[in-house]
Amino acid sequence: MYTIRNKVLFEYLEVVTVVAEITEAGAESEDLNMQVIENDKRLAALKAYAMTA
């Protein structure tokens, strides 16, 4: 059973995977994940919103 939180996180991972494929500069999706987590302050707000669901 998917919750809203799971759906948001799944969509996020899908976007990161697509971006990694597009860059083709050797960027791994895991590297992009770490950059987004470390640099994007909006992710904290997204996580907080997802946790309320």
Image (cartoon, grey):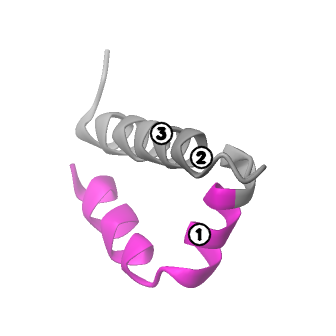
Which is nearer the N-term, disc 2 or disc 1? 2
Q: Which mark is residue 18?
A: 3
Q: Residue drawn at (59%, 52%), measured in percent from left and top?
A: 23
Q: Residue drawn at (24%, 57%), measured in percent from left and top?
A: 52
Q: Where is residue 30 shown, x and y percent of the image? A: 72, 49
What's the residue type where badge 3 is placed?
Val
What's the residue type where badge 1 is placed?
Ile
Q: Nearer the viewer, residue 42 or 22?
A: 22
- Residue at mark 2 to residue at mark 1: CA–CA distance: 15 Å
Residue segment shown in magenta: 32-53
Q: Quadrant of residue 39?
A: bottom right
Closer to viewer: mark 3 or mark 1: 3
What's the residue type where badge 2 is placed?
Ala
Q: Where is residue 48 shown, x and y percent of the image? A: 34, 68
Q: Nearer the viewer, residue 45 or 29?
A: 29
Q: Tag 2's secondary structure? A: helix
Would you call the spot at circle 2 few (<14 residues within 10 Å), some (14-19), or many (20 or more)?
some
Q: Residue drawn at (74%, 47%), measured in percent from left and top?
A: 28
- Residue 29 placement, left or right of 12: right
Q: Which residue is mark 1?
A: 37
Q: Main secondary structure of the magenta part?
A: helix
Q: Quadrant of residue 51?
A: bottom left
Q: Which mark is residue 20?
A: 2
